[in-house]
Every structure is written in C-alpha cells, then in structure tokens.
C-alpha cells in the first residue's frame, strides 16, 4: 500500500436541489477525494483554506487517515461555491463563485510529500498541475482531472499536462469538449492518443467508460432511486479509483483498473445520497462491501 498525494480545493458550498437546500456545507475536490481515497490508503492533501475553516472539519480529515501538513490556513475566507440543480441532476447551475483565498493558491509541497508514489491533480489550473509535477520526485502513478473552464481558457497548457500523466478522469461533456468528439467512446479514443495510459470518462447516472490500449471496460452506475445532491460524485469516484490503485500497488494492469472503476462507482453512489460529504464522512468499508455485493447482482450476467 502506498500513500496518495492529492492537490485540490477545499471549500464550503451552498447547494440547492429538489431535495432541499444546504448552506455552507463542506465541499471541494480535495475533501471528496480524500474521504473516498482514505478508505483504501493513507492520503496527504495540499490545499489552502481561510480563517473561517472550522476546526471540526480539519479534525474529520485527520480521523480518516488524511495528513493535512500540506494544508495552509491564510488570512481571508475559504473558497465558496453556490449552485442549484433543477430537473437535470447531471448539471448544476452556478449561482455564485467566491474564490477568496483560493484565488492566490500556489501549491508548495512539504519535503515529506515530495516522494509520493501516487499523485492526483484535482481540477485546478493546469499551470498549477504542472507546478506540482515539478516538485514530486519519481511518482509511480500520476492522475488528473480537469473542468470545462480550463479546457476553454488554458487548453494548450492542459494538453501539456496530459502528456505527463498516466490516468485521466474526466466527465463526458468535458471529454467531448476537449476532443471535439460526439460521444464518450470517440472521446476516450481521442484522449488515449494524447498521453494518458488510461482514460476514464465519467457519465454520471450512466456510469463510466474506461479506455486503455487494451480496449474498453464499461459499466452503469449503481442504481440510486433518489439523488439528493450529485455535487462531488466525480471527485469521490476519483478518490476511490486512486485509492484502490494505491492499495493494490500493481500499477495500471487491467484487473486493477476495473476494480478501481467499480469502487469509484460504489463510492459515488453514496455521495449522491446526501448533501456535500454528509454520507461520505461516515462511510465504512463494511458499507462499501455490502453495496459491492448488490452491484455485482445488478451487473452480473449469471
């Protein structure tokens, strides 16, 4: 088992869905990723928060085997995002984005983090993703996520990142936007030619497409009757995916990638059942294993 380094955002989100409204609930890519990944392997997080970031939220990470040495608290307020889902639960309407201290985020890795074997670059500025890669020594596996803003505003820099990573996790709309393809399969075909050895196109309630040089692996999402809040489901998937790979420590062999994708689906299905990290923060491996049995029943041909 190897430690995982994740660099990303920690935030407070205000989220409205047909199920209700959650003001200033804990969010951010690094939080979702860390809580999911820490069920499988120890996590080290690099990020920045403001003076308003509550001690209980830091303590929650620590109790989940997350090292917060690389987390800086600076003067000002923590990144805050407000969004709403109305009808289409696959896409949020952004109502407000307050970057606050995250606007000046410049990741600096503690010396103890620079030997990290598993490195995940959450959807921060591609230029910052490259800066992180300059600070790590000889990682065994590097993964990354991105978002539509970076695809439209910093495509050239993002393409450089793709040439330096092993695994890309990206949602379907972003994959099509980046490649110009019209569907997830065609997009994954194009992305695998841009550098990554493995590409996972996340498709929300429709599951995922895994593309490697060996071919495809496709499964639906775990069926959830009531989606309370889909925010962070993709980051949760990424955390479980990378956590699984770090636990097995077998690299990108197809069996490990398949297991990682299944665990990504399982963990994401828990996240969407509550606002923010409310379900994820209390999740245990026992709960995951029980759902794995149910998922196998749903997807098995036997």
Image (cartoon, grey):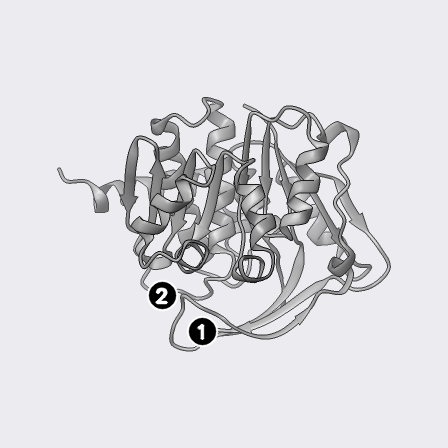
| Label 2 crowd bin: few (<14), some (14–19), many (20+), radius 10 Å | few
Relative to 110, residue 218 above or below: below
- Seen as rendered, the residue at the extreme right is 75
Residue 70, image quadrant: top right
Q: Indicate the quadrant containing the N terminus: top left, top right, bottom left or bottom right.
A: top right
In primary-sequence order, the first of circles 2 and 1 is 1
- Front in this rendered view, residue 277 or 118: 118
Where residue 12 appears, x then y in whole percent?
66, 63
Residue position marked by numbered label 1 in the rendering: 19
- Residue 226 badge: 2
Relative to 218, residue 146 above or below: below
Q: CA distance from mark 2 to mark 1?
A: 9 Å
Residue 23 visible in the displayed image: no
Q: In the shown orientation, is residue 128 left or right of residue 162?
A: right
Q: Residue at x 76, y 49 (%)?
A: 106
Where residue 94 appears, x then y in whole percent?
56, 73
Where residue 44 appears, x then y in whole percent?
67, 36
Q: How many marks?
A: 2
């Amino acid at each position: 088992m190897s430690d995982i380094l994740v660099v990303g955002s920690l935030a407070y989100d205000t989220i409205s869905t047909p199920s209700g409204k959650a003001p200033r609930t804990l969010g951010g890519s690094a939080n979702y990723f860390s809580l999911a990944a820490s069920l499988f392997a120890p996590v080290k997080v690099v990020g920045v928060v403001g003076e308003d970031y509550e001690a209980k939220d830091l303590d929650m990470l620590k109790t989940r085997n997350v090292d917060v040495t690389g987390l800086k608290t600076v003067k000002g307020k923590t990144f805050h995002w407000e969004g709403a889902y109305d009808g289409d639960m696959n896409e949020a309407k952004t109502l407000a984005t307050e970057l606050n201290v995250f606007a000046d985020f410049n990741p600096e890795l503690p010396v103890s983090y620079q030997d990290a074997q598993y490195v995940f670059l959450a959807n921060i500025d591609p230029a910052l993703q490259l800066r992180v890669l300059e600070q790590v020594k000889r990682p065994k596996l590097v993964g990354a996520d991105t978002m539509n803003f970076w695809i439209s505003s910093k495509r050239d820099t993002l393409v450089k990142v793709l040439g330096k990573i092993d695994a890309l996790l990206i949602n379907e709309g972003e994959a099509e936007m980046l490649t110009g393809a019209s569907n997830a399969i065609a997009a994954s075909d194009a992305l695998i030619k841009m550098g990554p050895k493995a590409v996972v196109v996340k498709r929300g309630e429709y599951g995922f497409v895994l593309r490697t040089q060996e071919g495809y692996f496709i499964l639906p999402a775990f069926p959830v009757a009531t989606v309370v809040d889909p925010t962070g489901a993709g980051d949760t998937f990424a955390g479980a995916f990378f956590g699984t790979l770090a636990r097995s420590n077998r690299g990108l062999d197809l069996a490990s990638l398949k297991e990682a994708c299944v665990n990504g689906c399982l963990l994401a299905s828990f996240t969407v059942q509550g606002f923010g990290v409310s379900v994820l923060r209390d999740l245990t491996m026992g709960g995951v294993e029980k759902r794995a049995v149910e998922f196998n029943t749903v997807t098995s041909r036997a």
